[in-house]
Image (cartoon, coloured by chain):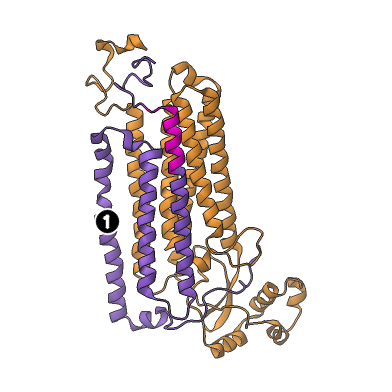
Chain colours: A purple, B orange
Amino acid sequence: MDHQQNLASPEMTFQHHHSDAEFRKRVRKTTILLSIITLIELGIGLTIYTIHKGANPNASLVLGFKGMVCILTLAKAYYIVSVFMHLGDEIRNMIMTIVVPLMLFIWFIIAFIADGNSYKNLRNKFDQHFKETTMPNKHHKTEAPVEKPGGKE
Amino acid sequence: MSTQATVHQTKWWSGGKSPFNLEYGKLMMWYFLMSDAFTFGAFLISYGSIRFSQNFWPDPNVVFNAFPGAGHQNLPLAFVSIMTFILIISSVTMVLAVHAGHKQDKRGVIKWIAWTIVGGLAFLGCQAWEWHHLLTGEHIVLADGKLEMVVQNMRGNPWGKLVENSTAITAALNNTPHETLVSLVHSQHHSNTMAELSTLSDAQLRKLVDLAEVHIREKGPVAFGGYFFGITGFHGFHVFSGVVINSIMLIMTQKNVFQNKGHYLMIEKAGLYWHFVDLVWVFVFLCFYLI
């Protein structure tokens, strides 16, 4: 095929070449990968649920699992953006104009989560009523509703 | 096309050529999506900030455990995993539509765009069911020394701390007004109509209440409802507008608009938007249902 005529738009000077078979293989691989990651996430979600149901939930174990789900989510986001949205195929400088501003999120997340946490600690220290009424019970019975009351479904 | 490639017509970006080897509209779509990512990010981070400022937050597996047609069975994560897979699959069909556009394959574009629209509508249907379930399902809550029937909406949250003090529950039952008792008994004995039950005296109603088999909670943080409905609603609005955009693309393809233009770049831009909707859901799924 003629190189020039294959261009989708006159604004573009060259075309990324992907053969049909290669493209299909890549899409299939990414789809399977995304599905597997989602299934692992669901597995971890159910594990967290079982830990919560137990007599003495291990807080740091739950936190570890939650961290794992966050990392898996970032992996999913990477594959969607890089393969499905074809950002990985673009020119490096173009990728940087998108990715570098998003770095702001690193500060954004840390600052605001820390702010919320500090507000909680201050309230627990100076507002005894808040602490007494909202602190979760130390040991709790099974969290699973055997049967949900009501519900018109 | 070959005639357009001469020098004096290449004023595409007033600089001779696209610096990023990218069509202008597509680049602007990327920048729009980046700003939209900050909007969603700000919402989700605000949710995280409020969540970290609370001692207690409802467990998502307790809140989202219903499945259409499964009655009161406890099925955490089941329904939302279906919604997630619907969006992943519709993202894949969109990739295939964009690819068909690269190959100038009009029939392929129509086929895959149509499947993407079907996926989007299926997702919106699932979300409508979930919202309806949360907004209409009543749950027994102990508040101000009496029992109440509370639904999950912007003003109330029935998923607070579990009440384990049975004497407090008995005392609360004695303070509960007639109307609440009627709906409480009705929720446990579906065979009796509300009208039948309201003729009974409070003492008779209290005997019918079976508190052993239900978990009674306090009211939970009100912010939960606002964030859940606000963020999933904003995402649902994106899905809806994505479906509208894809439908317009479908009609334009059918009317040979892109065929006559000689390229299917509009499908690529619509595709970017649709993938972004899937991308946001990945994070909404993480923040509201998994952690």
Given residues B39 and B124, the one toward you in this image is B124
Given residues B237 and A50, the one toward you in this image is A50
Q: Is residue A147 above or below residue B234?
A: below
Q: Is residue A138 above or below residue B245?
A: below
User: Which amino acid, by three-letter code, is at mark 1?
Assistant: Phe
Q: Residue at x 55, y 21 (%)?
A: B255
Magenta stretch, main secondary structure, is helix
Q: Position of residue B36 (x, y in %)?
A: 36, 44
Q: Position of residue B41 (x, y in %)?
A: 35, 52
Task: Look at mark 1 in the image and give the residue it sits on.
Answer: A108
Q: Is residue B156 visible?
A: no
Say whether residue A59 is left or right of residue B104.
left
Q: Residue at x 47, y 40 (%)?
A: A28
Specify whether residue A29 is painted magenta: yes
Q: Is residue B23 visible?
A: yes
Specify whether residue B45 is painted magenta: no
Q: Position of residue B185 (x, y in %)?
A: 69, 77
Q: Position of residue B233 (x, y in %)?
A: 48, 52
* Chain under numbered label 1: A
* Residue that protrudes farthest toward the top in the picture: B3
Say whether residue A79 is left or right of residue B140.
left
| Magenta extent | A18-30
Given residues B34 and B61, the one toward you in this image is B61
Q: Residues within 10 Å of mark 1 (few under 14, many from 20)?
A: some
Point out the image quarter for the N terminus of chain B.
top left
* Residue that protrudes farthest toward the bottom in the picture: B167
Point out the image quarter for the C terminus of chain B.
bottom left
Given residues B200 and A125, the one toward you in this image is A125
Q: Which secondary structure lies at badge 1?
A: helix
The image quadrant that residue B266 belongs to is top left
